[in-house]
Every structure is written in C-alpha cells, then in structure tokens.
Image (spheres, helix red, strand yellow):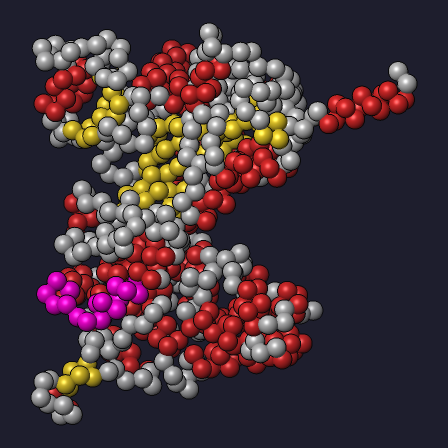
Amino acid sequence: MSRATISGDLNPRLIDSSIRAKDKLIYEQLKNYVFKHDLLVDKLIYKDVKLTATNDDQYFVFEDFIHQVLLLFSRDTTVLKHFAQSSATPPKSYIRGMLGVSDYAVVYPPNGIIPFHGFAMYVAPLCYVFDKPITLYYFFREIYTRHLFRLHTISSHPQGIVSICILFESLLQACQPHLFYHLRQMGAHPLRLAFKWLMRAFSGYLASDQLLLLWDRILGFNSLEPLAILAVAIFAFRRVNLLETSSYAAAEAVLADITTIKVMPLLQVILLPKD
Amino acid sequence: MTFSAALTTQIYTMASRTCKYACDMEKSVLVSNFDKRGWAQVTSDEEWNFYWASVVSAKTIFNVETGYRLQDDQIINHFPNHYELTRKDLLVKNLKRYRKELEKEGNPLAEKDELGHYCYMDFIPVTFLLPADYNLFVEEFRKNPSSTWIMKPTGKARGIGIFLINKLSQIKKWSRDSKTSSFQASSARDSYVISRYIDNPLLIGGKKFDLRMYVLVTSYRPLKCYIYELGFCRFCTVKYSASSAELDNMFIHLTNISVQKHGDDYNKQHGGKWNIQNLKLFLQSTRGREVTSKLFDDINWLIVHSLKAVAGVMNNDKHCFECYGYDIIIDDNLKPWLIEVNASPSLSATTVNDRTMKYNLINDTINLVMPGGEHPDVKWNKTPPKGLYGHYQLLYDEELAKQDQEFSKGKVSLGSGSRREGKVKHAATWK
C-alpha cells in the first residue's frame, strides 16, 4: 500500500495534499489559537484520545499527533463551510446576558463540531501515511468535511449514516436471507452488530493496512458505500459460525475480532457478478 | 533376541525416552511449552535432556573445574563463550577484527567510502573501550566536539550505569594519565565502552524507539541462524525533544498527552510495544516500499555479520543453541545501528499480546532445535524441515549456501529452488 494511493498523488483530483505557503500561515495561526486559549472541548478531546487511540496497539504511538490535530481542528472555523452539505447545524452559544439574541450568537466550538467518544479514531489511521503534522492536519480536515461527517449526523442524504445502514440491511437481506433471518430471530439484529463498524468507518476494528485500503476505496468511489458492502461481506464470510450461534452475545463474539479480515477479496466477492 | 524380549526392550526404551527438562526461571511462557509436550521436570542436578539455563548456570556447567561433559541427548540454551557476542566490549573487538580481516582479504564487503567509513560494515556506532582506548577516543572526540557520546559499563545490563557525555571533563577518570584514576588494568567493574550517541533517531509520532529482534543460532560453524518475524518496537513514553527540527512541528510546551500517566508507568494494553508489521506499514506509506525493504535487508545483514564476526572465536559446542535478543536503533536516514545483543532476552510478559508472542517464540525455538519433539540428539545435521519454522525465517545457513555454490558450479543454479529468503540471496550475491 503505497502513499501514492491515499494521498492522491496518482489521482490528483481526489485530494490535493500539497501544502502551499498560505496553508502554512493558517496552520501557524491555528497553533497560536491553541496556545492562547483553552476550550472546554479540549478536555473532551484529551479524554477521547486517552480512551481510544492510546489504548489501541496499532495507534498508540501517534497519540500526541492525534491530540494536537484535534486541538487545531476544533478551532478551525473553515470547517463550518461543510455545514452547507449537512443537515446538522453547529451548536451556538450566546454572549453573556444576550441569550437568544442572534446577533450575539457564537458557534461553539469554533468549528461547530462537538467531539464524541471515538472521534479520535477518524484521525488515527491517517497517521500511518502522513508523518508531518501539517499534512496530516489538512488531509484529515479534507476527508472529514468531504465524507466522515456524514457518519455521525442524521440526514436523508444517500451517503449519510442512515442510508448506509439501510444499504447494509437490504444488501445483507438480499445476499444472505437465511443468515439475516436467523440473526433476527434470536434477537441479534445485524445492524446492532455492525453499527459500530459503520459509524467509525471500521477504524480500530480492521488491521491498519486493510483500513487504509478501505478508505482508499471510499476516496476512489467518492462514496461511503464500501462501508456497508464490507460489513455485508464480513457477515457472509463468517456465515457458518454465525449460523451456529444462538444468542446476541455469541454472535457478537464471532464478530468481535476482525483484524484478520482482508478487505479487497471480500469487497470483490460482493461487487463482482457471480458467473 | 526373542520377540517378547525385543518388545520389552522397546517399551522400556520408549518409557525412558520422555524428555526431561530443567529450567532456571519460573516463566509461564517456558513452562507451558514444556508441559504441553508432556516433558518431565527435573532439577539441573539430575539427568536432564533439555536445559533452559540462566547465564550463570550455563557458565558453571561449561567451567573447566566445576562443570561436566554433556551427553549426546542433552542440549542447553547457551553457548559456552556467548559473551564474545553479548558483552559490549568483546562484540566491538570482534567486529573490528572481522572488518580488518575482510579488508586484508580484499573482500568487497570491506569497501570503504571517501571518508574512510565502511560502506557495508558500518553498523555499530563508533565505539571505544575505556580506559584502554582513551587516547584514540579523545582524538575522535576532538574531530566533532559538539557530539554526544554514551557511556555503558561492559558488565551490566538493563540500562544500569549508562550516562551521556558531551564534554571530555565528564570522563576524566578514565584517562590513563589521570592522577585521580585508580587505574585497574582489567577490572570489569571499571571498564566501559563509549559510543557515538545516535542523535538523529527515527521518530514516529514524535517518539523515540528501539527495535527488538530475536535471532536463534543453532550452530556457528557452519553458521545457521534464524530470525523471528514477530520482532517489536519499544517506545519511550516521554516525547523525544532533542531535535530542533521536530520542535517546529510539535507543541512542546503543551503538556503532552503521552507524559500524563494514570499511575502506571506503561499502558497495560500495549506496554509501549509496537508490532514490527506496523513499523513496516508506516515506513512503506511515508518513505516508500524500496527504502523500507532496504532497511529490513540492512537489519538482516547486520545480524548475519555480527554472527560471522564471532563465529571464529565461538566454542561451537554441538550441545548448544542460543536465542539472542538484538537491540537495534534506526536513524532518520533509515540506517540501522546495532546497540546490543542479549544472551538472555526477557521472557516476562507485560501484556496479553506479549505473552502470546513469547509463548510462540519458545514454541518455535524448541521445534527448530528438537524437530523430533521427543528427545534431543546432538548428532543430527541441524537442518530442520521448513514446516517447523513457525514464525522463524531462515536468515543464513552456511551449509546450504555452500551446497548451492557447489551445485551452481555445475550447469544449473538452484535459483529459487533453494528456497532461501531474499536476505540470504543478498549475502550469496555479494560474495
């Protein structure tokens, strides 16, 4: 897996990861903001990184990078632009004493996104590809505002998390009706089992090299659908074991460890027509 | 002999063929491996077949006065004079001698560049023995007065007694001319090695790390060594802050998350250890496939040469095998540096992954040194079947290499049929 694929060197129209002088200035300015002011969300970010990335034996090495990228990210107001594509609205706060007066409203945090448990895992896999924090930052910002934000906002958008879930369910039901019925019958609804994969775009669940291949496909297809397709493929792959389970806990155990899953063959099984 | 007598003899022999092991350390990764093979535990004073000994016990056994001869069905996990490799001062001495020998032979491996550095054999940092080489050291130090050097006592392990210096005054007492020094000729307690400190280590996530690789040697002449695929990187918990280039990128005065501890010194989940596969992925993605392959080839090179350097002086006792822990640092130019070789790498497990890895290490080691599984026999040819390698990879088999050479002197070369790893092909090619 070469750097060329995910950074778009081969495919410049995917994501332009070249850093211009203007970008450097903006980056420095964001750093200054971090030095000057603390935000309450900084504590959330800290906790999130400590609980997720620091405990992951693939990503713990990058905990400092991830922490710092997120600190910058939360102060970056250009991120607000993506709300034009989102049905979410950034949370607002009001200047003291002016509650409800829209002229005195400020977006909080500055980028409009309140971090949640697992948010750091959106940054973590990229650390394998970008060893300079500035490139890491810009690439993360781009991939987030283009794709990842849809995974944690409710919307009817065909790429949104709701649609991805629907896609997963209908695809699984179509490909593996017997398995689907079996799981539902015993109270282990497939979506309950797969949801965490979908929302985190499999980060922290797949092996890092496989995850990068998957995210590459997301960029290449310019779509989050590969997430649903892979989830279906994994269920199909572990079909035999899943059919033997008779409880939610047992089904969960079968799917607990997917670090051995190879993304490409599984995607191809679903995507390519059967002869 | 009657049928029943023959049968009785056979049953009697089989019963007494249960492998008996002695073990100096109460480590679960060892004991569980012995138990699962149905071996019987005995003390080291009794008749054992397999002895996983401490360095001290092994020394006693091989000692001319206190020791005893080993039988054909006894194997032990140390070579009598492993310290030729595992003591820092002797390793340096042997390497320097080996390089000079190659140079004298006119071997292309000993080629030097325009600065006088060895092209292929430059894998230990410039090192001197103190107090013996004090003057040579001073000469070298003065060439680069701003350099940092690291002082390590020769006899100790686990980082005890190590310190850094950047001024000559800090090591005055090792000066031979110094009136203050109570110069004792070869007191191991006072002798140190001083090496050039690698001040541009490769940093990942802003953190410094070193590499631990396991290497099994079953014979020195001919050299047969295997490298364990599941090596790992050991990361510092504190961020490295010497390099000014990094300072621009890092928010050094923000309290770094990695410094904040919740009571424990290390995280129980990963213990600061990073799988070598992660390192490979990171380097391939950030630096490119070719230079990454070259790095790992260089590491294999380094190991093979370090073993060849001591092969001549090593007591090639056929009852011995040894599993070494190689400590390697990679610098920012993706050049590996050999720091140390350990004869008794730690078998304690700090995390679940660690325990699994070390358990597999011992399992694969036993399979390679005792392929039959039941009873050691030192007369065997020490060429185990490939199916038993487990996570080991053949690094170099001198015997097989010679056979290949002789074969290719004929018409057809074995080519890929020899099934040796690419690293070994390099060694054969460069010769």
Q: Which image quadrant for residue B7?
A: top right
The N terminus of chain B appears in which quarter of the rendering? top right
Task: From the top left corner, tell me how far across and down residue B58 is, in percent.
Answer: 47, 19
Vertical placement of B76 versus A114: above or below?
above
Task: From the top left corner, tell me how far across and down residue A211 is, in percent.
Answer: 45, 61
Is A190 left, or right, of B282 in this rendering? right
Task: Determine if residue A265 is in view.
Answer: yes
Count of numbered badges drawn on the protein:
0
- At x 61% / y 15%, what residue is drawn? B71
Is B59 left, or right, of A41 in this rendering? right
For this rendering, which residue is in front, B70 or A169?
B70
Is B136 left, or right, of A167 in this rendering? left
- At x 32% / y 32%, what residue is drawn? B158
> What segment carries the magenta color?
A34-49
Vertical placement of B50 versus A126: above or below?
above
Residue that protrudes farthest toward the bottom in the picture? A101
Vertical placement of A215 versus B83: above or below?
below
Vertical placement of A155 versus B52: above or below?
below
> Residue A44 colored magenta?
yes
Task: Determine if residue B424 is in view.
Answer: no
- At x 37% / y 72%, what residue is drawn? A148
For this rendering, which residue is in front, B269 or B48?
B48
- At x 47% / y 34%, what residue is drawn? B26
> Residue A261 colored magenta?
no
